Image (cartoon, rainbow, N blue to C red):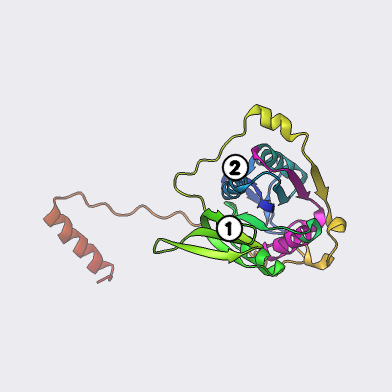
Amino acid sequence: MRFIVCVKQVPDTTEVKVDPKTNTLIRDGVPCILNPFDQFALEEAVRLKKEGDEIIAISMGPPQAKKELMKCLALGADKAILLSDRTLAGADTWATSYTLAQAIRKIGDFDIIFCGYQAIDGDTAQVGPELASQLGIPQITYIESVEELSTRKLIAKSQTDEGYKIVEVRLPVLLTGITPSGFEPRSPPLPRIIKAKQKPFTTWNADDLGGEKDKYGLTGSLTQVIRVYAPPIREKGAMITDEPNKAVEKLMEMLIKDKVI
C-alpha cells in the first residue's frame, strides 16, 4: 500500500510579523517546527505500515521546510517531496489544496492520504477536506485512530461532540487526524536521523507540477486576508472581596448602575 502524508512547517512562536502588503506571515528568521497534528498523522501512518508498504511525506513551503521533511524521514517515511517555488507563495487553503492535489496526481496511485486536523499557525482545518474534494475521494475527519485496515477498506475511530463514532470507508480515502489526549510527539534517535539522509528527497517547482499556473499561490487564492491585527487589551475586571451577602449587594448595585439589569 502507498500512504501519502501531508505535513507543514509552522512557526514555533507566537511572535511572528505580518507582511503589510500581502497580509501573510513573514517566516524568514522565525524558528519552526513540524506541525504537531501532522506529526500525529505521520506516526499513525508509520504504525499502520507493513512490509512492502510505502510512506511519502509531502510539504509545500520555502527551502527551509526541508528540515521538517527530514524529520519525517527519520520518523519512518520512505520518501519526501518538497513543493517549493515563489509561484506557490501566499496561497490560501484552496490554492494550497490545489497544489498538493497536483503533486499527488504526479506521484500516482495511493491508498490513504494522511493530514493533520489543522495547522497551528492558521487553525483553519480546511486543507484536508479541500484536498479530498480536489481529488474526488471520500474523507473522514477528526480521526483519533485507524481501527482496521485491509486492501479495500478502512475502519476509523472519529471524535464527535458527543463522543466517538466508528466509520467504515472504501479506499482510497483521506484522513485528518486529531491528536488523542495521551499523544506525545516523538523525537527520532540519532541513528534514524543519520539514516534519513540516505532516503530519497525531491524538490518540485511549479513547472514540475504542471496544471494551471493562475491557480497557484496568491494569484490562485479564492480568499484574501484584508487585515491582520492583535485584539485590543481588555481592561481588568472589577473585583469584589467582601463577605458573600455584601458582595451580592455590591454586585447588584453595579449591574443596575451599568443598566445590565
Residue 65 — which label?
none
Q: Nearer the viewer, residue 98 or 141?
A: 141
Q: Which residue is mark 1?
A: 176
Mark earlier in primary sequence (1, 2) = 2
Q: Does the magenta run of residues contain 139?
A: no
Asked which quadrant contains residue 234, the reply is: bottom left
Residue lying furthest left: 245
Mark 1: amino acid: Thr
The percent position of residue 14, horizontal first and vertical second, equals 56, 46
Side of 167 relative to 164 (left or right) = right
Q: Nearer the viewer, residue 247 or 254?
A: 247
Residue lying furthest top: 190
Measured in 3D between alpha carbons, the distance from the residue under mark 1 to the one under mark 2, in whole angstroms, is: 22 Å
**Can the viewer see residue 117?**
no
Residue drawn at point x = 71 percent, y = 46 percent: 52
- The local secondary structure at tag 1 comes to strand
Side of 261 relative to 173 (left or right) = left
Q: Nearer the viewer, residue 153 or 54?
A: 153
Magenta stretch?
75-104
- The local secondary structure at tag 2 comes to loop
